[in-house]
Image (tube, rainbow, N blue to C red):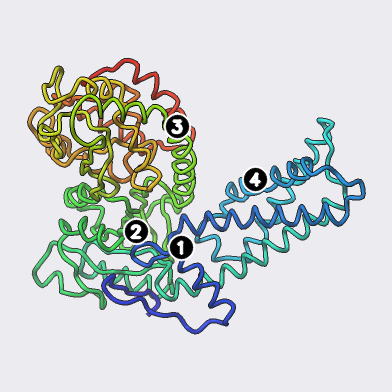
Amino acid sequence: MAIISHDPTESIREPRRAPPALDAVRRWIDAIFSDKRRNISRPKLLFATSAGDAMILIATGLAAFHLLDDHATAFPHVAAWTAAIAFATMLELRRNWSYSIHALRQPARQVGKILRSAVTVFCLAIGAGTLMGLPTVSPAVGTLWLVSAIAAMAAARFGLARILAHLTEAGRLVRRTVIVGGGPDAEHLIATLEAGNHKELAILGVFDDRGDERSAESVAGYPKRGTIDQLPDYSRSAGVDLVIVTVPMAAEQRLMQILKILFALPVDIRISALNAKLRLSSNAYTYIGRVPMMALMDRPLTDWDRVIKNIEDRLLGALLLLLAAPVMALVALAIRLDSKGPILFKQRRYGFDNELIEVLKFRSMYTDMSDASARKLVTRDDPRVTPVGRFIRKTSLDELPQLLNVIKGEMSLVGPRPHATEAKADSDLYQTVVGEYFARHRVKPGVTGWAQINGWRGETDTHEKIERRVEADLYYIDNWSLLLDLYIIAATPFALLSGKNAY
């Protein structure tokens, strides 16, 4: 069968026997890049590929300077050139869509991208250096560096493509897919995908609300996993990447009901147009194999965006934790002197994809009055809050320990704030007030966010406050960029000075 059917409770199928050297590399990649479901982490793999390109460029550059630079150029000059060209080439390769799993499966096309990107960067860098009067690379060094770097990166791409093929065959590097809607439409869709030999998909099953003869217990050999209402829980447990909806676009009301359920999931959502009578321009469709799809929603962060955001969180998180350490030590001392009990307070909150995480805070309430589930909102002059607690809550210093959550990978520096499980607005649970509430969990929660710098932090005693907060969170998710994150981080201290709504 062309499409791999893989139940997450079953063991992973082993690929055909690879050559010993390739098999050793595959096991090494498997050990480093596997996630908790034994799938290969795409962001980690793409980051390793880009880092490998940088190391190749630096190594070949240093070798070329060492072999052909008769003037014994000073090391700082050599280091600056190799680092600058390596970084610029990585950016150019990313601009040319070289860092994606789909692109890496096609090594022949990669050679052309590598050639164009490397030549462009070398010419621009050397030309700019000459115009600015900087010491540049000699023709001999530049030629050897360029040729050897292109050859090494191209060879690495062909080796990586073979490894990816083995991992795909084993079901370790596929898009875990579910079909929504059964009957003939689903059967036709699956048959077309299989006929197209599209091996990058692993169909896990079908979800359909119909329980009569119109919806059998299996469709084209794939099991019916449950109703559409059961899909969110299954998606989280099975690690679903892609949802394909076969419900006809003409069934507008039913389609809207389905999409309301799916909207909160951090997955790609496509509507199959295979049996659609209305044909639009080819530009209106994306294709999976030979199947035209209407791209309804993509996961908020692409694989490469997740790489960038993870690097941002780890590097800036570690730096901010180092800078905040003296302040955190003073806060800890003040809490210890102010009231009895632990310095830190742990609270279970909703994290990425609605998973529960333990968020760290400095304790701001008396120990015997702590409210771990946040059933009662903290209000102005709340008797449960200690004197030190009032100050650190108003200035958000109580949130500083969450930098540890960021470094652990449970949170991001920037994102929707994580809310306690029983948090309420005017006595109503957040999720009952705002229908799109859980959609904010399509990304990791953050220490700060777009809502916080726009005044929607602190007490949520009215429905409007949580509605505006969720609205700001969804705006952030839809408009994410590295520059937006950096802006929010820079604006956060100024937003905290007002102390608005924070008690």
In the image, residue 67 sits, relative to residue 345, either above or below, namely below
Residue 68, percent across and down? 88, 54
Q: Please, what secondary structure does the residue beneath circle 2 have?
A: loop
Residue position marked by numbered label 3 in the rendering: 484
Q: Quadrant of residue 492?
A: top left
Query: Which of marks 2 and 4 precedes in the sequence?
Result: 4
Residue 388, percent across and down? 24, 22
Cβ atoms under marks 4 and 2 closer than 8 Å = no
Res 21 label: none
Cβ atoms under marks 3 and 1 closer than 8 Å = no
Q: Observer-nearest residue: 105 or 22? A: 22
In the image, residue 275 sits, relative to residue 66, either above or below, namely below
Query: Which of marks 2 and 3 precedes in the sequence?
Result: 2
Circle nearer the viewer, 3 or 1: 1
Going by the numbered disc 4, the residue's amino acid type is Phe
Going by the numbered disc 1, the residue's amino acid type is Phe
Res 33 label: 1
Badge 1: residue crowd in 10 Å (few <14, some 14–19, many ≥20) = some
Residue at 27%, 45% in the rendered image = 351
Q: Quadrant of the C terminus?
A: top left
Circle nearer the viewer, 4 or 3: 4
Query: Which of marks 4 and 1 precedes in the sequence?
Result: 1
CA distance separating discs 4 and 2: 31 Å
User: Farthest residue toward the right?
Assistant: 70
Q: Please, what secondary structure does the residue beneath circle 1 have?
A: helix
Residue at 13%, 61% in the rendered image = 209
Res 241 label: 2
Badge 4: residue crowd in 10 Å (few <14, some 14–19, many ≥20) = some
Q: Observer-nearest residue: 25 or 427? A: 25
Residue 301, percent across and down? 41, 46
Query: Which of marks 1 and 2 precedes in the sequence?
Result: 1
Residue 327, percent across and down? 39, 27
